[in-house]
Amino acid sequence: MEIYLILLAVALVGGLMMSRLTKLINLPAVTAYLVAGLLLGPYCIGALKLPGLGFNTLEQVEGLSVITQTALGFIAFTIGNEFRLSQLKSMGARAIIVGIFQAVIATVVVDAALIGLHLAAPHILSVPAAITLGAIASATAPAATLMVVRQYKAEGPLTRLLLLVVAIDDAVGLVLFSVSFGIANALENGSVNVMGVVVEPILEIILSLALGALIGLLLNIVEQFFHSRSKRMAISVAFVMLAVGLSCMEFRIGTVNCGFSLLLVCMMAGTIFCNICDTSEELMARVESWTVPLNILFFVISGAELDLKILANPMTLLVGVIYIIARSAGKYLGAYGSCKATHCSESITKHLGVTLLPQAGVALGMALTATSLQDGAIVRNVVLFGVLVYELIGPTLTKRSLLLAGEIKPENRTSARTLNTPKPPVNIQ
């Protein structure tokens, strides 16, 4: 117990100190936290095996998974705040179209590139592994995006559409992965599991949305019994933790495996709550301030989880570079094309695709499932390599795009301690 408490303290202090250094070169705090995690991880300082000074083993890092899962739940709950009816009326249809299209195009482009690699060099990558990686490419990390938006207090039509798209992306990615992984298994085993390909992913989405809606309704009822701001915030925190805990449960109904998506459950809870509670804006803001240390720990621990040994494998690097280039092109082209089709402004059309590059937890979870394939090890390593690259450069690219779009004030004109002056509502036409 004492070692874990010391580790958490070291992780917090290390992440914050690193953010002071990266501020000198204008990098987002998210990148600082990830770098701090890498340095404290089992392949750098942790390798010294000094108790309490860094994470000595990956098992130690994994022992703190409750922290990362809880932080992800609060991040998803906060994103649910973007799904207010006023927002959905103005850009809900666009967000759905862009969210689906950019994910599908990313999958198609990565599939084409990696299947092409298979045809050129069959011994490097199998077709099942290629199409599985294509589906994993659809996933976008909401955590890094939200942290950049929070840090620089970005505000505008691009920011609002971006937060809606990354929220929708989770459900789309889940369906794409389930279908692609089912096809991959069919190619390897010679049989198709319709239950696993079609029924289970749809059921997971429905169950997740239903559970999230129920939690959001209950939160609204219970918080009315309290009038103290601090107690109402405590109730909100308790219900998000409840949502995280319940979303980790799995059960069977006959031959059907049933489970929940943590992100969808917490986002739906946040969406329902913010639309039916009159004081939800204030409560959301208070919950956000409460979770600042938790979010720092999330990224430091995520950085410590990144396996640097994969950099020693040239085949992983080759497939990884192709994966990164193809996914980046797919995300950008998918966002660009769908924004054009839905008549978004030129600023959104040009910059949205770049902001969708960060990739982390959801992709790693998919990669863990894919280890059951014959080439499952290379799928996991390629995704780990992609996450390493995307998490280190993705926040910076997101910041740059929001800056170019005029939704972040240049840093020499503002301070992180001062809110940006709210802009009047802008039509994204």
Image (cartoon, rainbow, N blue to C red):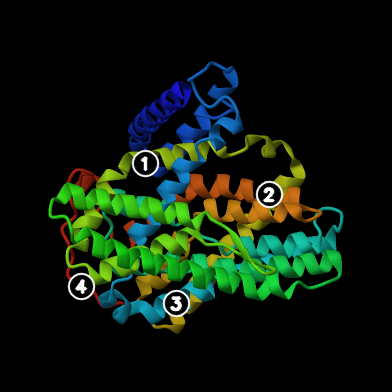
Give the side of residue 71 with respect to residue 119, left or right: left
Label 2, secondary structure: give it: helix
- For the point 55% across and 68% down, the residue is 204
Q: From the image, state whether disc 1 or disc 3 is nearer to you.
A: 1
Q: Is residue 318 visible?
A: yes
Q: Earlier in the sequence, mark 2 or mark 4?
A: 2
Rate crowding at label 3 as few (under 14), some (14 to 19) or many (20 or more) other CA atoms within 10 Å: some
Q: Is residue 389 left or right of residue 236?
A: right
Q: Nearer the viewer, residue 271 or 351?
A: 271
Amino acid type, callout 2 = Arg
Residue denoted by label 1: 294
The reply to whether discs 3 and 4 touch (Cβ–Cβ < 8 Å) is: no
- Which residue is under mark 3? 96
The three-letter code of the residue at mark 1 reads Leu
- Between 253 and 416, the residue placed more toward the observer is 253
Dot 3 falls on a residue whose secondary structure is helix
Contact (Cβ within 8 Å) of mark 2 with mark 1: no
Closer to us: mark 2 or mark 1? Answer: 1
